[in-house]
Amino acid sequence: MIPRVADPDLFDSIAAERSERMHAAVRARARDPATSHAAARRAAVIVSEHEGRILYALRYGGPGTSYDIADRCIGMTQVQVARRMGELETAGRVKRTGRQLPGKTGRACDEWAVN
């Protein structure tokens, strides 16, 4: 059993691997106020931390659905995990295993693994 993921510092090395793609995706418009630019920078850091936590949970806990991954990441919800999976898949960091497993609601959920 792996430890549940709580400490964001644990993910510095994973977060450091993030490409400029992430920072380009979360931007404020040039004409936006300084507060919007600051919020965009904070959002980029949060997304990077979330992605690092998800990758850690998959690397050390094995494949899982967004519900499984959220259960391994203290303080993250299934919705937060699910929102990051598409971005991680596009970046080539995770892949769908081809299996669909029942989620907590009984609906089919994709199973994810580190790519």
Image (cartoon, rainbow, N blue to C red):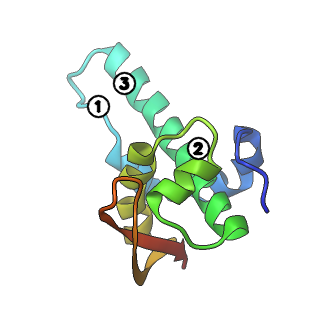
Which corner quadrant holds the N terminus?
Answer: bottom right
Identify the residue under disc 1.
Answer: 28
Name which residue type carries label 2.
Answer: Glu
Q: Is 52 left or right of 87, judged from the image as shown?
A: right
Q: Is 82 left or right of 62, judged from the image as shown?
A: left
Q: Distance from label 2 to label 3 (Cα)? A: 19 Å
Which corner quadrant holds the C terminus?
Answer: bottom right
Secondary structure category for the residue under label 2: helix
- Residue 39 spot, x, y in % from top left: 40, 23
- Of the numbered discs 3 and 1, the one sitting upstream in the chain is 1
| Badge 3 vs badge 1, beta-carbon distance below 8 Å | yes
- Residue 55 spot, x, y in % from top left: 60, 61
Depicted 42 relative to depicted 70: above or below: above
Q: Toward the viewer: 11 or 30? A: 11
Name which residue type carries label 1.
Answer: Ala
- Name which residue lies at 37% across and 24% down: 37
Would you identify the image quadrant in which residue 107 lies? Answer: bottom left
- Of the numbered discs 2 and 3, the one sitting upstream in the chain is 3
| Badge 2 vs badge 1, beta-carbon distance below 8 Å | no
Q: Is 28 left or right of 4, judged from the image as shown?
A: left
Name which residue type carries label 3.
Answer: His
Say few, some or many: other residues with alpha carbon within 10 Å of mark 1 (under 14 / 14 to 19 / 20 or more): some
Identify the residue under disc 2.
Answer: 49
- Residue 84 spot, x, y in % from top left: 42, 54
Identify the residue under disc 3.
Answer: 37
Residue 2 is marked as none
Depicted 19 relative to depicted 70: above or below: below
Q: Toward the viewer: 81 or 68? A: 68
Say few, some or many: other residues with alpha carbon within 10 Å of mark 3 (under 14 / 14 to 19 / 20 or more): some
Say few, some or many: other residues with alpha carbon within 10 Å of mark 2 (under 14 / 14 to 19 / 20 or more): many
